[in-house]
Image: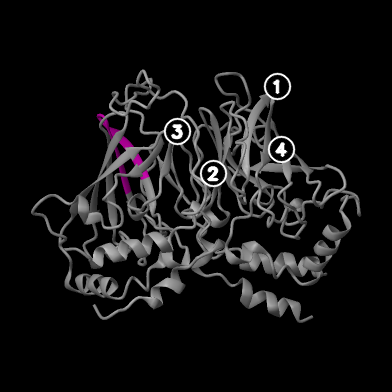
Amino acid sequence: MQSVRIAFALACVMTTAPAAQWLKQPTPGIPRTADGKPNLSAPAPRTADGTPDLSGLWRPAAMLIGNIAANLPPNSIPYQPWAEKLYKERRANDGRDDPTANCIVGGVPRSDLVPYPFKILQVPGMVVILYEAVHSYRQIFADGRPFPADMNPTWFGYSVGKWEKDAFVVETKGFNDKGWLDNFGNPATDKLRVVERFVRKDFGHMDVHITIDDPGAYTRPWDVTLPLALAPDTELLEYICNENNKYFEIIPKAGAK
Amino acid sequence: MKTIRFIVVVVFALSTVASAQWLKHPTAGIPRTPDGKPDLTAPAPRQPNGKPVIAGLWRPAPGIVGDMTRGIKSGEIVPFQPWAEALFKQRRANDSRDDPTARCVVGGVPRSDFVGYPFKILETPGMVTILYEAVHAYRQIFTDGRTLPVDPNPAWFGYSVGRWDGDVFVVESSGFNDDVWLDNAGRPATGALRVTERFVRKNFGQMDIEVTIDDPKTYTRPWSVTQQLAFQPDTELLEYICNENNKYFEIIPKLPTDR
């Protein structure tokens, strides 16, 4: 029950959105069925150069929200002992040291594993993700640049992407050592390297195959697949975490079991 | 001197980047002089449809950060309603203690374009997006022909739609909350605010934004300022996470108030 309670607590604290009015805005230019509904099983659109067009408003499949390992067999994350201990501690104390409790951005891959939509934009030389969560964004450079030699440690890291046939492959390094991989608190260090393979399966569905490679926290690289669903006929809301943050009002109560 | 001190405070308070390493990255595809330096006086680039490109990394021109009236026409004054002038003076007198961005809330419109941090403009089909270094926030400007919503959620950035008027990209925004400050100096606004921004790219390295403020609850008539932007070649946005190490409330209480 603890995880249910945490998920509920997080849903309460992380959201200014449910009370707000959901935005209804017909998404222009999407395939529709005869009755006008979005045709989410239509083929994936392609850009002028023939690669799939990833752009659109996306949302993670419900199952993986909060817990990156939800689709993995039990006990399959190859923790180093210290990392497993820290993870259990975070689970036991209702995530009270969660950096996002202070309205800091989730980072990579955590920002894709929260119950808020995000908009992918493709511009020449770059893919950009606009997150509803904490109203933040991420730049993925696709202009052929290599990683900088001496990166500023950051929450989102530094991302470069390239096309491998129909998959957009993003490699990210340069993280600080404070990031959580997911809401549940799977740890990471500044040795973290994340590889994401974005595969748009059809108009309404995209998989992100995520590889976590952090020899500071895990004994070997490990993989998960995150299914995304297109969110048609709506828009991002303005989520300003600092405006009315209730995390520290709720979490201490959640801890008094 | 008060103005200068105020700006120094804001620069300190808003800055986690000062000690960070500036990013050097050659900007691809920009005009350069024979010695390889960016040619900022080259003509404005154009899109296939003939409209000027406004995409790129921009920053307010030096000297016009913080106080939007630095770009007001000579002889013009800000036509405050009396309550708004009193509130503005109070904010100036108390070192902006009630500034919403002190708590890492986004600056909004037009304030986010008047701060000492660069921003990147992106153009995609149906939308212009601005990625702000400040507070790592973004703004969407819809260009797909939609109209401003009748009953928008009140927001810091409001709701923005844009269209081309000849060579000028014109953005109309409404749907603001009542808490917005128009600039760091603390000029007030209400939910009645409408902002019109005319983006005029003058050449490769320079763009003006002609900003018109129309808020009949706060000002007796619409008024305008011109914000000058300078293109930022060969660098990138930094990750500015305001909540990580926010010193605003350590600095502000130490300032004397009896000036």
The kind of residue tagged 4 is: Glu
Same chain for mark 4 and mark 2? The answer is: yes
The kind of residue tagged 1 is: Lys
Instruction: Categorize mark 1 by other alpha carbons within 10 Å: few (<14), some (14-19), many (20+).
Output: few
Q: Is residue B124 magenta?
A: no
| Count of residue discs | 4
Same chain for mark 3 and mark 4? The answer is: no
Residue labelled with disc 1: A165
Q: Judge from the rendering whether residue A61 lies leftward or rightward of residue A33; answer left or right.
A: right
Front position among marks 3 and 1: 3
* Picture layout, residue B251 above or below residue B117: below
Q: Which residue lies at the image location 13% right of the left edge and 49% below the top edge?
A: B73
- The residue segment tinted magenta is B161-172
Q: B257 or A200, which lies in front?
A: B257
Query: Would you identify the image quadrant in which residue B150 lies?
Result: bottom left
Q: Which residue lies at the image location 30% right of the left edge and 65% below the top edge?
A: B6
Residue labelled with disc 4: A196
Query: Would you identify the image quadrant in which residue A100 lies?
Result: bottom right
Residue labelled with disc 3: B234
Q: How far apart in space, not on screen, are marks 3 and 1 (Cα)?
A: 30 Å
Front position among marks 3 and 4: 3
Q: Secondary structure at mark 3?
A: loop
Of pointers 1 and 2, the one earlier in the residue sequence:
1
Q: How far apart in space, not on screen, are marks 1 and 2 (Cα)?
A: 30 Å
Of pointers 4 and 1, the one earlier in the residue sequence:
1
